[in-house]
Amino acid sequence: MKKEINLWDYAGDIMKELQKGVLLTTKSGERVNTMTIAWGTLGIEWARPIFTVFVRENRYTRTFLEENPEFTINVPYGTLDKKILGICGTKSGKDTDKIQLAGLTLEPPEVISVPAIRELPLTLECRIIYKQKQDPEAITEESKRKFYPQDVDGSFCGSNRDYHTAYYGEVLAAYLIE
């Protein structure tokens, strides 16, 4: 059962949990993929509630977002098995079914095609209304050194030398899975 919530009543909880890690879930065709994120923003743009996610260019999730411009944000609310965020933050969906490996339960969505996740019950259903690749020239040298070191191997999933694309998702539904 889902209980519709007022997004702004839960904004503080969402941002607090984001710092520890939440899941960004995507779907392409019949395949569902999820990844742990700790970078994101919640706000208002163009008079709409927006959740913006930042996804590196080489992430498998980015491929899904380009194929299907919808995503869910799955936020812990109550008890969470920390291994879920660990698995979803260190494995690539390209060669691992993270949903199965982490023992996650998919719940049908209300508005979009991407499911919610029962184990992280505070859910935002979002549809991308804008995207923008980061401009490396506009990033400070300090941030480049810290978050985009170029002296690492960029060919594997955990590499962090590539930049992000910001995906602005209009929040179309917000609820708690009970």
Image: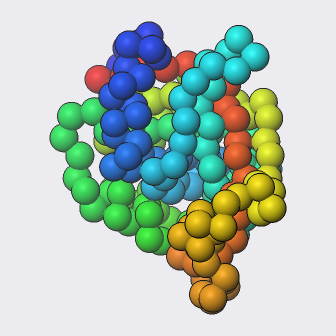
Q: Residue at x 59, y 63 (%)?
A: 143
Residue 125 sits above or below residue 140 on the image: above
From the top left corner, tell me how far across and down residue 173 is, in percent.
Answer: 55, 19
Q: In the displayed structure, would residue 58 be above or below residue 66?
A: below
Q: In this rendering, would 67 be left or right of 111? A: right
Q: In the visual, does 70 lie left or right of 177?
A: right
The location of residue 47, given as percent across then percent down, is 71, 11
Q: In the shown orientation, is residue 101 left or right of residue 136?
A: left
**In this orientation, which residue lies closer to the viewer: 146 or 90?**
146
State the residue lying farthest toward the left. Answer: 79
Task: Tell me what residue is drawn at x 54 percent, y 29 percent.
Answer: 42
Q: Quadrant of residue 33?
A: bottom right
- The foreground one among 130 and 149 is 149
Give x and y (percent) for residue 20: 33, 49
Q: Position of residue 71 (x, y in %)?
A: 62, 39
Count every numbered label the image shows and give the total.
0
Q: Quadrant of the N terminus?
A: top left
Using the rendered view, name the quadrant where residue 169 is placed. Answer: top right
Identify the residue shown where x is 21% and y is 34%.
Answer: 78
Whether residue 27 is visible to the viewer of this picture, yes or no, is yes
Q: Quadrant of residue 15?
A: top left
Mark yes or no: residue 121 visible: no
Structure colour scheme = rainbow
Horizontally, residue 51 falls left or right of residue 137, namely left
Q: Quadrant of the C terminus?
A: top left
- In this rendering, is residue 14 above or below 164? above
Q: Is residue 146 above or below residue 16?
A: below
The residue drawn where x is 36% and y is 25% is 12
